[in-house]
């Protein structure tokens, strides 16, 4: 359904268009009739009919002023009803709420323009004559009342609590902290040792044998397989390590007390001349080199570094504490 303003625009537009059209048609017809008749240029008209045309046009000419007056009145009414943004650009000033029937339908809009304040004041809306009717007191904006001081709480008499007798707690046995065990010390090397620890003897010392240059066995033989590790019998210095003819590969050590230890028929040498060794250090591997009838270790203890200056090896080592025969 069209609004009131749309209906007003249509009325003004219709009245204006009709009035203007009527004025133009009347003016054109009258001019053509008069000019054509007076000048004798109207085709198909006689002189006698000119008077008739004048008589017919006179009422129209007489009503021309009335039509023009009606058109002006309609235009004036349209100008009053057009809004401010129409072609007439008529400025409509705001009215006081409730003073005009045209503002009655806009009453709900004032609810959106209500300004809430904490208390009545002289608040003015912009470009408004009076806006106190649009001011409402907002109770939620009012300052809260000052808090009333609360009376101090009365101290309550303490009830005597029966003293609990402290019961002696049984002493808990202290758990023994695990002590970090010190690493086991490395087994001390013996001061003296057998040249082939745990190996049995196969040919004793000083056994008569005319095949030897000395006429007897100058050392002791240990029955070991080729490749068996051989160790130093005590702290010593390597005198020589190499090939020695009938003794095959041999090692000679000078012991700490001045005696000499000789290892013969070895398969591999593990030390060199001038090297320092201790009891239990490896000096090489047993074998079957030189003048040998089978794999074994021929071992001698000499008082001097020469052939035949020998003593019993087992007795010598046992006297120094060696027991691993």
Image (cartoon, rainbow, N blue to C red):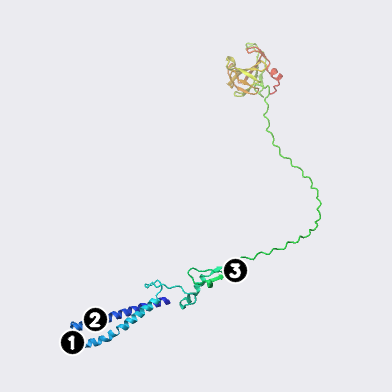
Per the rendering, the mark at residue 31 is 2
Q: Secondary structure at mark 2?
A: helix
Pointers 1 and 3 in contact (C-beta within 8 Å): no
Is there any visible trace of residue 2 in the rendered image?
no
Give the residue drawn at x 21%, y 81%. Answer: 35
The residue that disc 1 covers is 47
Q: Who is closer to the viewer here, 197 or 18?
A: 18
The residue that disc 3 covers is 139
Q: Earlier in the sequence, mark 1 or mark 3?
A: 1
Q: Is residue 156 left or right of residue 137?
A: right
Q: Secondary structure at mark 1?
A: helix
Task: Find residue 210 and report its image quarter.
Answer: top right
Q: Is residue 126 left or right of residue 152?
A: left
Distance in Å between CA atoms under marks 1 and 3: 94 Å
Distance in Å between CA atoms under marks 2 and 1: 18 Å
Q: Where's residue 109, x and y in %?
A: 49, 72
């Amino acid at each position: 359904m069209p609004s009131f303003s749309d209906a007003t625009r249509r009325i003004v537009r219709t009245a204006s268009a009709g009035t203007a059209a009527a004025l133009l048609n009347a003016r054109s017809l009258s001019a053509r009739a008069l000019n054509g008749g007076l000048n004798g240029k109207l085709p198909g008209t006689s002189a006698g009919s000119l008077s008739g045309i004048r008589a017919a046009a006179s009422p129209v000419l007489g009503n021309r002023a009335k039509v023009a007056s009606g058109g002006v009145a309609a235009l004036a009414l349209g100008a009053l009803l057009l809004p401010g943004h129409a072609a007439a650009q008529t400025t409509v000033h705001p009215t006081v709420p409730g003073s005009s029937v045209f503002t009655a339908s806009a009453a709900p809009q004032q609810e959106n323009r209500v300004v809430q304040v904490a208390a009545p004041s002289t608040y003015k809306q912009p470009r408004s004559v009076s806006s106190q009717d649009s001011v409402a007191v907002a109770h939620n904006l009012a300052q809260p009342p000052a808090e009333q001081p609360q009376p101090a709480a009365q101290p309550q008499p303490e009830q005597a609590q029966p003293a609990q007798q402290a019961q002696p707690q049984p002493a808990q046995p202290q758990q023994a902290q695990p002590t970090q065990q010190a690493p086991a010390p490395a087994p001390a090397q013996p001061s003296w040792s057998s040249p082939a620890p745990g190996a049995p003897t196969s040919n004793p010392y000083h056994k008569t044998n005319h095949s030897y240059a000395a006429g007897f066995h100058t050392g002791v033989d240990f029955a070991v397989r080729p490749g068996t590790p051989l160790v130093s019998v005590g702290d010593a210095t390597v005198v020589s390590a190499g090939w020695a003819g009938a003794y095959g590969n041999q090692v000679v050590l000078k012991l700490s007390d001045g005696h000499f230890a000789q290892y013969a028929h070895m398969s591999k040498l593990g030390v060199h001349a001038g090297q320092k060794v201790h009891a239990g250090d490896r000096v090489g591997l047993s074998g079957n080199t030189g003048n040998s009838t089978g794999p074994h270790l021929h071992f001698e203890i000499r008082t001097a570094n020469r052939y035949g200056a020998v003593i019993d090896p087992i007795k010598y080592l046992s006297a120094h504490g060696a027991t691993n025969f």
